Image (spheres, rainbow, N blue to C red):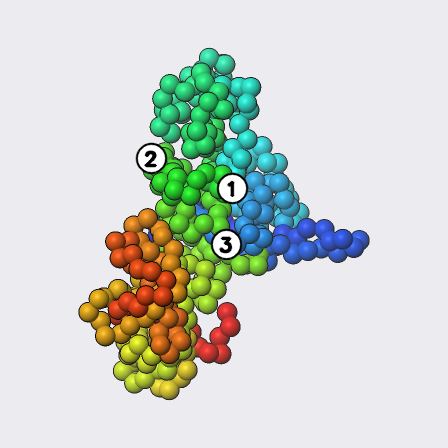
Amino acid sequence: MINNKSPIHLNLEDIHVSYPGEKSGSSIPIVKGLSMSLQQGRIGCLLGPSGCGKSTILRAICGFEPIQSGSITLDSQKVSTPNYLLAPEKRRVGVVFQDYALFPHLTNAENVAFGLRGISKKEAIQKAEDWLIRVGLHDVGNRYPHELSGGQQQRVALARAMAPEPELLLLDEPFSNLDVDLRERLASEVRDILKANGTTALLVTHDQFEAFAIADDIGVMADGRLVQWDSAYNLYHRPANRFVASFIGYGVFIPGKTQVGPSVEIELGSLPLPQSSYGLPGEEVDVLLRADDIVHDDDSPLLATVIKKAFRGGDFLYTVRLDSGLELMAMVPSHHNHEIGEKIGIKLIADHVVTFSKMSIN
């Protein structure tokens, strides 16, 4: 679990959000009893498939959606309860939208200066130019958004959201319109910018690699609920349930049986178990094997047939099948370019063994 000594900056306590249903008086639950907290200066991420409610949470934090129960607290002030809704413009929350929402008729500097109030136009433009530099954009203030690349436009949108120095920055799928190869790199750059400015931020995305690149704390969502709020490392190696285990990373579940030791016996051999995850000897379990648990080894006597392959730059993600019919996934360096139908040697190297009871469906 996440634990640090920084003060809590954003706190959501058991919030429920519903939308009106088709029938009069009916409602459709979207967010169901969600609780989470984000510390000052941390970058959080809500990660999950489309329709899980993550963007609705951002709208509730902004004040665009009322909550039916629970509370939202920002910097020690309650901003949303079932009976109270602080106006969005009074919340000091900045938002970077999926489509950037830049004004095409304004220069980049004018776009950044748009939300600045209480200072002269000259001061606003100067502050905008300073923020453009802070996000890595030099000499683009007098140009227009259409003259920039998608990644540069995203940075202009980021500068515009950060220029008023909000209490909290929200990012709604900010990289989804960019090329896949650019997303993770830009996410890492945005993280550096946010950290350099001490900004507390919350991102929503369906892309786990974006989440890993930018966030300190990640919450996996499913069907309107927060399934696990944790570090990327723990989500990968210590998933709370089957959904997290299958949603994060690449892997398969294979049958096993617990043994005295403690250990678990699977078709590929015996694996040691941490005492905390060990049940009774002889218990039937499902064992999670990640793609990085299966290593390519030309000298291994254990052979598997390549049935699928996906090129990922530095690696191939292979799906392989043993003679028994058991299918596994293996992440292999890309200089090992094997053809579909070819047999390759594999061996099992699993340092973090995760098991789930056969009785567990979550």
Mark 2: few, some, or many residues within 10 Å (few <14, many ≥20)? few
Lower position in the chain sequence, tag 1 or tag 2: 1
Q: Which residue is mark 3?
A: 48
Q: Position of residue 188 (x, y in %)?
A: 35, 41
Q: Position of residue 25 (x, y in %)?
A: 78, 54
Secondary structure of the residue carrying numbered label 1 = strand
- State the CA–CA distance, disc 3 to disc 1: 13 Å
Secondary structure of the residue carrying numbered label 2 = helix
Numbered label attached to residue 196: 2
Please tell me in which quadrant of the rendered image residue 27 appears.
bottom right
**Which is in the foreground here, disc 1 or disc 2?**
1
**Which is in the foreground here, disc 3 or disc 2?**
3
Lower position in the chain sequence, tag 3 or tag 2: 3
- Residue drawn 38% across and 42% down? 181
Mark 3: few, some, or many residues within 10 Å (few <14, many ≥20)? many
Q: Position of residue 244 (x, y in %)?
A: 45, 62
Q: Is residue 87 left or right of residue 192?
A: right
- Residue drawn 53% across and 35% down? 99
Quick one: which residue is furthest to the left in this view? 299
Q: Is residue 328 above or below residue 210?
A: below
Numbered label attached to residue 348: none
Q: Position of residue 46 (x, y in %)?
A: 48, 50
Q: Quadrant of the N terminus?
A: bottom left
Q: Name the kind of residue labelled 1 in the image.
A: Asp
Q: Which residue is mark 1?
A: 172
Toward the viewer: 206 or 124? 206
Q: Name the kind of residue labelled 3 in the image.
A: Gly
**Residue 239 visible, this orientation:** no
